[in-house]
Amino acid sequence: MYAVFAVSPFITIFALYFESDGCLALLCLKNIFMDYQEVINRIYSDFQSKRGEGKVADYIPALAETDPMRYGISISSLDGDTFAVGDADVNFSIQSISKVFTFAMVLRLIGDKIWEAVGREPSGNPFNSLIQLEYEHGIPRNPFINAGALVMTDRLISLYDRPKEALLDFIRSVSGNDDIYFDQHVARSEREHADRNMALAHFMKSFGNINNDIDTLIDVYCCQCAISMNCNDLARAFLFLANHGVNPLDGERILSVSQAKRLGAVMLTCGLYDESGDFAFRAGLPGKSGVGGGIVAYIPGNLSIAVWSPGLNPHGNSELGVETLERFTTDIGNSIF
Ligand code: GLU
């Protein structure tokens, strides 16, 4: 550590230091004066009448069993604090939030070659659309629509002998929770209703962009979507992105600074299906949602926040989750902009 170089009067103390590889890095030492617990308590209380808004996903029958009244918020800060309210410690199905983990694992191992398999533009289409794939020759627009996520899972299968275990190991290490598991009830239900994902996978295989057996791919993909976590786990698990690629729990560099920047940029532009632009406009944060009703977002150099409310809006994003994150950045007067 070489120097503490700046003190912002209201929010954060930073330190500038050199890593072992010579890279210059910025570390958030302490958020001062911002009472995040008070902020989320107030949002939680003000939004009580909105609980249950939206429609719980039912295209996977096991997801339809979720209580629509659930509502939790959790914040993890880079200085080691956790702030939580409501159902922040109740597990739910993370669904598409898992796509960030698989993407990070593949990006870490194959680097820029990843862009030969998947694009980085918003699709403007629903998460499970087949249409673009035909005229874009089997290269999905981005890693966060289902087609792109299937390609990432396919690469994970090629890269690891035991991809499911590798994925769980990764998530356990970034979340600091060794008990994270695949919810087999949800995974089974998803496998039984995977016709569209099977179609996407077969279609991409016909273009040469899927290398593994389709049944194996769908099995791993359904398990990854069925990972059970809570808001506290998720907020902690995204801190490595807020920390520019380094897991603050053990100091391990997972992504380079540049890779973390790129992953965050894809989250900002593509993380909320065909509502990504509107979410960027409203919340001003890189985020990722799932049809289980969770959304995770982060402020680089500062904190990560997870919200869960199962009712979805017509775009497949948590209705109250989006509202909560918009209100959060408005109340704290801070976002990436
Ligand atoms: N397992 C879901 C599917 O592929 C993921 C949906 C999502 O959360 O976007 O249908």
Image (cartoon, rainbow, N blue to C red):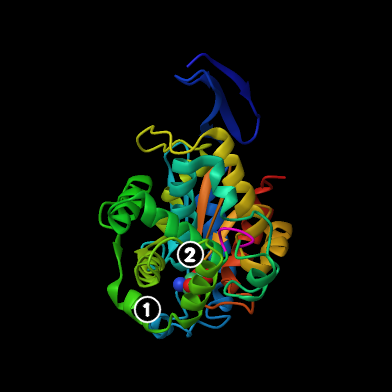
Residue stretch rendered in magenta on the structure: 140-144
Q: Which of marks 2 and 1 is nearer the N terminus?
A: 2
Q: Quadrant of residue 25?
A: top right
Q: Is residue 210 above or below residue 58?
A: above
Is disc 2 surrounded by few (<14), some (14 to 19) or many (20+) residues within 10 Å? many
Dot 1, how many residues are within 10 Å of its Cα: few (below 14), some (14-19), or many (20+)?
Answer: some
Is residue 293 visible in the rendered image? The answer is no
- Please state if 246 lies on the left or on the right of 50 as rendered: left
Residue 142 in sight: yes
Tell me where residue 203 sits by quadrant: bottom right
Task: Tell which of 127 and 40 is nearer to you.
Answer: 127
Q: Is mark 1 on a helix, strand or loop?
A: helix
Residue identified by numbered label 1: 191
Q: Main secondary structure of the magenta part?
A: loop
What residue is shown at x 43% (from left), y 48% (from top)? Answer: 105
- Amino acid on which the number 2 mark rests in the picture: Leu
Image spot of residue 54 (x, y percent): 58, 81
Q: Which residue is drawn at 68% across and 61% down?
A: 122
Mark 1: amino acid: Arg
- Quote the CA–CA distance across marks 2 and 1: 14 Å
User: Label 2 belongs to which residue?
Assistant: 150
Could you say which is closer to the camera, residue 48 or residue 136?
136
Residue 141 magenta: yes
